[in-house]
Image: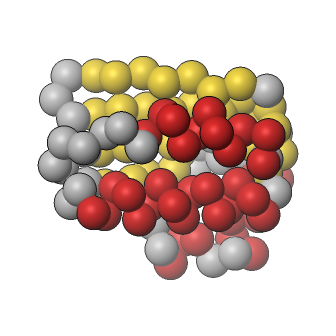
Amino acid sequence: MSLQIEEFAGNNVTIAIEDRFDFSLHQQFREAYIHRTEQGVNVILDLSKTSYMDSSALGMILLLKDHIEQLSGTLKLVNPSDAVYKVLEIAQFQRLMTIER
């Protein structure tokens, strides 16, 4: 499992999670965004290579969402697998944030 960060022009950042998204990534995931303080940052959470997600990952996403909203930014989850999308759907994350399949 791993986490990749890509930064693009402006305030655009992509965080990609590979394999398992669970509590073992907690510290690394938090470090990926906690030092971002620029207003209007746009974060894409790329889940295309995420094969598994547990409830701790849902909590981490909510903490990211809170942080981004404090910066008047946006958060978008993209390309979740069917299994990961099912977890997001059960937790009704589609009501809280944009999820693009």
For the question of whether residue 98 can be seen, the reply is no
| Quadrant of the image occupied by residue 30 | top right
Classify residue 9 as left or right of residue 64: left
Name the residue nearer the viewer: 24 or 99. Answer: 24
Residue at 21% in and 60% down: 72
Give coordinates of residue 1: x percent, y percent. Answer: 79, 27
Name the residue nearer the viewer: 25 or 8. Answer: 25
| Relative vertical location of residue 9 with respect to residue 36 in this rendering, above or below | above
For the image shown, how many numbered marks are present on the structure? 0
| Quadrant of the image occupied by residue 47 | top right
| Relative vertical location of residue 92 with respect to residue 25 in this rendering, above or below | below
Q: How is the image coloured?
A: secondary structure
Residue at 42% in and 21% down: 6
For the question of whether residue 54 can be seen, the reply is yes
Classify residue 14 as left or right of residue 89: left
Give coordinates of residue 55: x percent, y percent. Answer: 78, 63
Residue at 78% in and 48% down: 23
Classify residue 95 as left or right of residue 86: left
Residue at 49% in and 34% down: 32
